[in-house]
Amino acid sequence: MRGLNGAISIARALRVNSTAASTFLRHPRPAPYAATYCSYSIPQNLVDRSDLSTPPIVRSDVIGFRYYSSAATAAATSTPQQDLKTRGAEQNSFNPKEVVLFQYEACPFCNKVKAFLDYHGIEYKVVEVNPMNKKEIKWSDYKKVPIVTVDGEQLVDSSDIIDKLIKRIHPDYDLNADEEKKWREWVDNHLVHVLSPNIYRTVSEALESFDYITTKGNFSLYERLVAKYGGAAAMYFVSKKLKKRHNITDERASLYGAAEQWVDALKGRKFLGDLQPNLADLAVFGVLRPIRHLKSGRDMVEHTRIGNWFSEMEHAVGQSSRMNEHK
């Protein structure tokens, strides 16, 4: 009975608020530009040579901005928002001593925040929350994830966390730009809801998802075994209810449709932010990155046009800024 209750607890914790995750990203495709991270401190992780066919990427341990070797061309074609980001980077003094993310590895909203932190080169520690007892966040009145602490200050709700952090990095950043705001809301109100019915669509896909969740999550051996099989079974049936709730008739069609809708929104641009990803790009990427190497993600890339954008985002975001787990 304890095991069954544990599986139900996991299913509730992961309902809507989760996708199964994978950290095995593809090597970035060769690109005709070199990306450089600039900051006001001495870089620690100097060179990423994960793919020697691409120019080396210089990484910093604090927030920086990215520019391309064809700087003059980029400057000539940049949007006001991009110019603003450059000015913000040049003037930025945001350099926190400690950033801690309290998360579920499989939570799409947590992965939104991680994509933002990774892109901006903000080093962060991770506390993996046990979804059964949530003992890691008992100190907080807020009982959902993600929770981020910045030098001890608590920030909650993924979109609000990102809003507050981008304002500290770039104080003049326009959070009300119509297109960017529209698609950030689309991620929260639509995209996340098509994921669970897809990753738990069949018994085998549910087991694939929970195999990763239980490997990377904060579980004891007993909880891991119960969660993998009990949780997968529970979420398989829960996903059918979610499918009905969100008026989804065909899981894959809904996923493919969302991917195509996003590509159409790009209107031929490299990113929605044009030459550089904006907050909407990072939100979509963050939510989709965990499923990329699951069957649903592989099918999505194979059957839609999203693959090129996704590869560009992998290259733009670069390696994770995540540090060793916070104990």
Image (cartoon, helix red, strand yellow):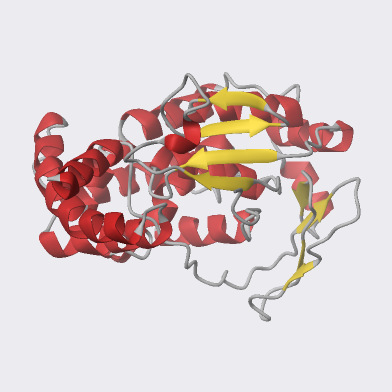
Residue closest to the eye, 225 or 314:
225
Left or right: where 164 falls relative to 230: right
Residue 100, image quadrant: top right
* Residue closest to the far bottom: 52
Residue closest to the eye, 239 or 278:
239
Residue in the image at 58% along x and 25% along y: 155
Counting every numbered tag in the picture gives: 0
Residue 296 visible in this rendered orientation of the protein? no
Tell me residue 160's x, y (percent).
54, 23
Residue in the image at 61% along x and 24% along y: 154
Query: Which corner quadrant holds the N terminus?
Result: top left
Residue in the image at 13% along x and 41% along y: 238
Residue 312 visible in this rendered orientation of the protein? yes
Left or right: where 153 falls relative to 13: right
Residue closest to the eye, 229 or 108:
229
Left or right: where 293 falls relative to 327: left
Q: Is residue 1 above or below residue 294?
A: above
Tell me residue 294's x, y (percent).
31, 63
Left or right: where 111 falls relative to 117: left
Tell me residue 101's x, y (percent).
57, 40
* Residue closest to the far front: 2
Q: Is residue 7 above or below residue 15?
A: below
Tell me residue 71's x, y (percent).
82, 52
Residue in the image at 47% along x and 68% along y: 24
Residue 143, image quadrant: top left
Q: Is residue 85 above or below residue 30?
A: above
